Image (cartoon, coloured by chain):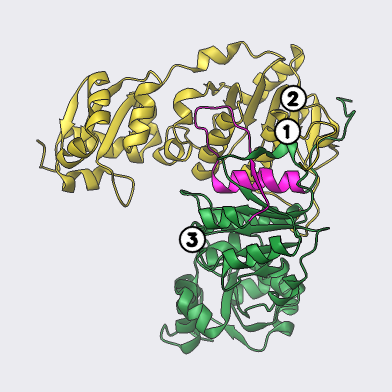
Chain colours: A green, B yellow
């Protein structure tokens, strides 16, 4: 059991938690908590190392066995050390280092039957986590992120997504605008969500295609808007005259998922 | 100009920022930033004191005049002192102490033409702020909060709501469940959003009435569910099988606002 703070694994985990550059360099990221670690393993990801406390091993013995068997290496640490590695206030005593998932290639075959979300320059990890969670819950077939979005593998995004990062097809193309332009040119239906010169989203069939949403403060870039076939907006009433990025994404994805009431529906 | 840290106004603002109990006792709350302070004044709220820095007074002179004229008292402080009072990393140098708004009485006349949101035990200030912002943007007529929701007057909620707290009718009844029960009994249509034994929200006419949403982790209490006329759920596809509270609220409010596509709509 590790009790000394300067152990290599402890150092590595701490650095993976804090540094996006280090995550990228190692090709690894962290998942913390019983549910997330289990989610990762069940989704087919193999932990390079599984860090746990003796207390949690006893408390969650079933999950422990499942995760430990999938892991290349396991590492018991004291509660004190775990607390130092943890990103949360009340750590559950389970933490895995996962290799980044090579799911990016699978999204190559975007087609006009599926629904896809594309995010440009999203900066807030809570927003991105929520949006990925919503995307999965509503059955989105894939997510495209511009490379200047916040890091999808940061602990906050992984946690906020409730494990959706393990299961969603996520693509981070080298050049976001060019990628969208190519999709549009190849006949994929692309929608820019923007309040300017746009169609009411309820008056357009958005039940297939790619929906672009932009930065929390400034929205989509002009280049990204111009790369799309259509512009759509959410009609609003209040004086706030705005929705935050994750609320807008929820509504747009809901419309894409065909969430609107079928004709003739009634209170029953 | 105040430069000493122990000034009474400084102490008071710091305490109003940190303590919900103190806010309640004083009947006051804070709004920080140029836009929020202006929003409050434009919405008819009068600042008891307007705290600013000389730099911000010059930079935002137009807004300064507007806010200063509506304020009972103005107070210039140094940038150092302002930074200590501020709840944000990059303070804009404007901050107002507002008296709490007596908007609660106006919601008394809930009717079956309007749409209303009721939140039970929402704990996360970011969620509540986002939900209020969304509620306003989608034209909700009033909001009911259980008294064990997080404080609607906390700086994080006020900021996250983008000023919607100044404009929305918000009621915090003494007994949330009893209040909902009375609404239901008086013929108001009440919906409990819950995944158990519920109708698909797209198959029910939710374009008027009161929508209840529950706690982030545990949802609505059984008592609250039983106090409602209908149970509705958002159909989901992914393995996450859940939406976070603000995503769920966005979709439900969108459906209430009649957001769904009219019959016969098409890609145009």
Mark in the foreground, 1 or 3? 1
| Chain designation of label 1 | B
| Chain designation of label 3 | A
Above or below, A178 relative to A209: below
What's the mark number on residue B82? none
Residue that mark 1 sits on:
B255
As measured in the structure, the alpha-carbon distance from the residue carrying label 1 to the one carrying label 3 is 36 Å
Quarter of the rendering containing residue B219: top right
Q: Earlier in the sequence, mark 2 or mark 1?
A: 2
Above or below, B246 relative to B166: below
Callouts 2 and 1 in the same chain: yes
Q: Nearer the viewer, residue B59 or B189?
A: B59
Residue that mark 3 sits on:
A89
As measured in the structure, the alpha-carbon distance from the residue carrying label 2 to the one carrying label 3 is 41 Å
Q: Nearer the viewer, residue A242 or A23?
A: A242
Q: Which residues are magenta?
A: A228-256
Q: Nearer the viewer, residue B178 or B241?
A: B241
- In screen coordinates, is B81 left or right of A120? left
Mark in the foreground, 2 or 3? 2
B240 part of magenta stretch: no
The residue under the point 46% across, 38% down is: B157
Quarter of the rendering containing residue A210: bottom right
| Chain designation of label 2 | B
* Contact flag, marks 2 and 1 (Cβ < 8 Å): yes
| Mark 1 neighbour density, 10 Å: few (under 14) some (14–19) many (20 or more) | many
x then y, percent, for residue A121: 51, 59
Residue that mark 2 sits on:
B207
| Mark 2 neighbour density, 10 Å: few (under 14) some (14–19) many (20 or more) | some
Above or below, A237 relative to A179: above
Callouts 1 and 3 in the same chain: no
């Amino acid at each position: 059991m590790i009790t000394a703070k300067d152990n290599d694994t402890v150092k590595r985990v701490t650095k993976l938690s804090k540094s996006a550059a280090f995550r990228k360099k190692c090709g690894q990221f962290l998942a913390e908590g019983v549910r997330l670690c289990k989610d990762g393993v069940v989704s087919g990801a193999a932990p390079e190392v599984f860090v746990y406390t003796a207390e949690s091993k006893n408390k969650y013995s079933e999950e422990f066995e499942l995760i430990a068997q999938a892991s290349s290496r396991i590492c018991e640490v004291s509660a004190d050390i775990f607390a130092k590695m943890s990103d949360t206030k009340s750590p559950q005593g389970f933490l895995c280092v996962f290799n980044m998932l090579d799911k990016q290639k699978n999204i190559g075959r975007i087609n006009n039957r599926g629904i896809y979300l594309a995010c440009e320059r999203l900066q807030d990890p809570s927003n991105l986590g929520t949006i990925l969670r919503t995307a999965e819950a509503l059955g989105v077939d894939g997510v495209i992120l511009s490379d200047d979005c916040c890091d999808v593998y940061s602990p906050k995004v992984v946690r906020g997504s409730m494990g959706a990062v393990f299961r969603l097809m996520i693509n981070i193309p080298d050049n976001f605008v060019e990628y969208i332009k190519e999709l549009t040119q190849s006949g994929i239906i692309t929608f820019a969500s923007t309040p300017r010169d746009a169609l009411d989203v309820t008056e357009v069939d958005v039940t297939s295609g790619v929906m672009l949403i932009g930065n929390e403060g400034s929205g989509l870039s002009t280049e990204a808007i111009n790369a799309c076939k259509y512009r759509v907006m959410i009609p609003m009433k209040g004086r706030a005259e705005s929705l935050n990025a994750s609320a807008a994404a929820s509504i747009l994805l809901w419309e894409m998922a065909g969430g609107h009431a079928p004709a003739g529906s009634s209170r029953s």
